[in-house]
Amino acid sequence: MNKFLQRGTVSPLAIAALMMLLTLLGLAFLYSIRYGHFPLQDVWSRWGKSATIITHELKKASGVQTDVRQMEQVGSAVQADAGMRQAATVDSGIRRCSIHGKMVYSDIDCVDSNPSTRAVKLYDNKGFEAPKIPVPVKVGNDDPDVDLRMKMIDKMVK
């Protein structure tokens, strides 16, 4: 059996991978145009701070020496976390502010130095509830005058 290799052609898998990468870049571009930033940047910065703190604590517990530059990073990460507010609860409420012209409801991003920051009270609800059964309506009236009229009308018709 003779197999002929095609030369000068591109693999369909390579084209599929290239198109997926191009689509991903296009979606990232459109997202950055609409929202102005990538959400993964915030996640990476938070994970980086917590990873630095955890690494430092593990090294300190195990007795491994750390250099001065790592100590400064840990100190700045701890200071940044110390200035953040605690998570919102129903009792404490949440804050509303304007950041870059957009209204934001956040307990972390809305700081006291922002003049548009307002406290918003939270209400605890029961979530989705089944509809209540309506009260049955009586068909007949209990008014004696109406009953008398209906009897008179029935007599006239017969």
Image (cartoon, helix red, strand yellow):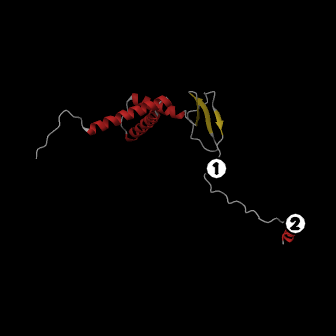
Q: Residue at x 47, y 28 (%)?
A: 33
In the image, residue 66 above or below residue 138: above
- The answer to whether the residue labelled 1 contacts the one labelled 2, judged by CB atoms less than 8 Å apart, is no
* Farthest left residue in view: 1
Q: Residue at x 21, y 34 (%)?
A: 9
Q: Which residue is mark 2?
A: 149
Q: Secondary structure at mark 1?
A: loop
Which amino acid does the dot numbered 2 rest on? Arg
Along the viewing direction, whichever of 1 and 90 lies nearer the viewer: 1
* Residue 100 image position (x, y, % from top left): 56, 27
Q: Which residue is mark 1?
A: 125
> Quarter holding the C terminus?
bottom right
Which amino acid does the dot numbered 1 rest on? Asn
Q: Is residue 17 visible?
A: yes
> Splitting the image into 4 quarters, where does residue 48 fall?
top left
> Splitting the image into 4 quarters, where does residue 10 fall?
top left
Q: Secondary structure at mark 2?
A: helix
